[in-house]
Image (tube, rainbow, N blue to C red):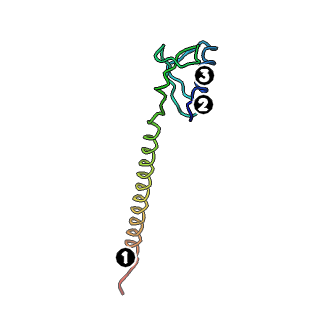
Amino acid sequence: MSVVRAYDLVHRITETLVKEAALPTMIHTTGGLQLIYTDHTQHVPGFNECDVDLTRIRVPKKQKKKKKKKKKEKEKKKKEKKKKKKKKKEHEEEEKNTLACARWKPK
């Protein structure tokens, strides 16, 4: 995103916030950016409503970590299912063998 588009985005958000008279410390936009508003930390030209600290616009990193955990959990579940299937097959084979031995009668 270019600097001009970022300024425009922040300007539109600040206008709506000032109209609603609610200036929170953090806003989540649709792009996943966190805009942190502070009181007179850094003045951006063209913003008369409130001052925005544009140096602190960042993308949250927690979302990526969650995806990795989900992948690991899915792999664990797949491995567990494979183990259960393998045990079930072995158990069925043992039962077949014992039944076959019980049916067999020496002549």
Assign a secondary structure to mark 2: helix
> Which amino acid, by three-letter code, is at mark 3?
His
Q: Earlier in the sequence, mark 2 or mark 3?
A: 2
Q: How far separated are the C-alphas under marks 2 and 3?
A: 10 Å
Name the disc covering residue 11, or none. 3
| Residue 71 to residue 104: above or below | above
Residue 71 drawn at (x, y percent): 45, 48
Query: Where on the picture, by quarter, is residue 98?
Result: bottom left
Question: Residue beneath label 1, please?
Answer: 101
Residue 68 image point, x, y percent: 43, 45
Which dot, 2 or 1, sits closer to the camera?
2
* Amino acid on which disc 1 is placed: Cys
Residue 105: percent from left, percent from top: 37, 81
Closer to the camera, 5 or 20? 5
**Mark 2 or 1, nearer chain start:** 2
Query: Which of the 4 image quarters holds residue 49?
Result: top right
Question: Which residue sits at x=46%, y=26%?
Answer: 56
What is the crowding at mark 2: few (fewer than 14 residues within 10 Å), some, or many (at least 20)? few
